[in-house]
Image (cartoon, grey):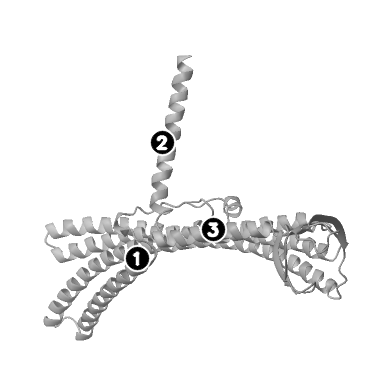
Amino acid sequence: MKLTKDLSVLKNLLIICSLLVTSVYGDELGSILSKNKELLFDYSLQSNELESDKLSNSWMAPIQLSYSKNYSTQFGSDIVIKGNYTVSVNQPIFRSGGIYYGIKYADSFRNANRADIKLQRRMMIGDAISILFSMKKAKLEQQKLRYQIKNDKIDIRQKRDSYQSGLLDSSFLDQAILKKSQDQTALLQIELTLLELNQKFKLLSDKNPKKLKLPKLKLMSKNSYSSKNLELKRDIFKSQQASDNVKVTWAKYLPAVYLRGQYTKGDPQFASMQGDYHSYGFAVTMPIDFNSYKDIESARVNKLKSAVQVMDKKDSIDKEYQWIKDSLHILNRKISLARKDEKVYKNLYRLTKNLVKAGEKTSLDSAIMYNSLQIRKIDQKIFRIDKQIQLLKLYIRMENAI
């Protein structure tokens, strides 16, 4: 009994820990947008719910209230005042299935708009996270260029010595100086890029980008990507909406039954009349519209069109997934090559240091190998960020993926 109780407590603790982890992770990503941006999406969702409710209840006819007061001298010189208060309703209770499919249409409308709003929010979150990845990549590019500029300076120094000794043509020295200048310009350009990225991030989020932890994304299965894809869900709901609309349009031109009722309270015009009375009944209507066929056919064409859009979206999703998968394969090969280069430069750096000790190489040669080694290490980090940016293109279209 005690063991069962202990297991139950442990299970609850694990659930709580899981929720805490999810909550913390969600705070870093799901709440990355500014308060104003989140409010706009919240209001959009609320507006969608209200408009969908209105559409779902549109088959319910309003109750008409009216009050009238008449002044008449028809029966003599005295003014006769008569007042009437009326409550009436003309409620459809049968529309050949139009009411049922009208409610289904409203639900499809609600779900399609909800998926679209969620997708817009996900895309905006994706933009903010993509900016964070780009900022991190730009900072790595800065580090890489600083190492490259160090090598440029060493190269200029070595070529200047060779030029002064008459061992090298001036054009080689000129090219080395030009290379350093180009790398320094590129470094300044990255500073401008970081400023621009920081400004773009501020337009989306009010959080400090330096304090946000970037996600570690992995390639999900194709089935998972397809089943959680918000674009596909939206198009499926729109297709269902178009299908329901065909039935609603068809029902418009079929018989409909209305229940009618009226209650009147007022002053009788004659003594034999009742001041208060009610009336009720029903009516069967069926419109004859010369455009009914075209109206129904137009709805059918929209249904077929939306069905094709769903098939096209499924095909696009498969191709997009394969494209990302292929690009990740190429980036993995780049990382592998950079890793091999890193091993080569490690050996060269170790060899050069030994040659420096032996007096056959200078400390400048050792510094070049060290800087080149660091550059290849940074290249691997840059390629890994490129992988994350590619994966983000999938994640931002998925519901509850990050």
The image shows residue 184 at horizontal and vertical percentages of: 24, 75
Q: Which mark is residue 202?
A: 1
**Residue positioned most to the top:** 1
For disc 2, the neighbor class at 10 Å (few under 14, some 14 to 19, many from 20) is few
Q: Is residue 352 at all visible to an observer of this figure?
A: yes
- Separation (CA) of disc 2 from disc 1: 32 Å
Most foreground residue, 52 or 143: 52
Q: Nearer the viewer, mark 2 or mark 1?
A: 1
Q: Is residue 209 left or right of residue 181?
A: right
Quick one: SS at disc 1? helix
Count of marks placed on residues: 3
The image shows residue 391 at horizontal and vertical percentages of: 48, 58
Query: Between disc 3 and disc 2, whose residue precedes?
Result: 2
Q: In the figure, 168 relative to 89: above or below?
A: below
Q: State the residue at coordinates (29%, 74%).
A: 192
Q: Which residue is mark 3?
A: 45
Q: State the residue at coordinates (79%, 65%).
A: 249
Label 3 is placed on what type of residue?
Answer: Leu
Most foreground residue, 297 or 138: 297
Location of residue 349 by image quarter: bottom left
Label 2 is placed on what type of residue?
Answer: Cys
Most foreground residue, 99 or 315: 99
Location of residue 125 by image quarter: bottom left
- Separation (CA) of disc 3 from disc 2: 30 Å
Label 1 is placed on what type of residue?
Answer: Lys
Q: In the figure, 142 relative to 275: above or below?
A: below
- Separation (CA) of disc 1 from disc 3: 24 Å
Most foreground residue, 249 or 365: 249
**Residue positioned most to the front:** 77
Q: Which residue is mark 2?
A: 17
Query: Between disc 1 and disc 3, whose residue precedes?
Result: 3
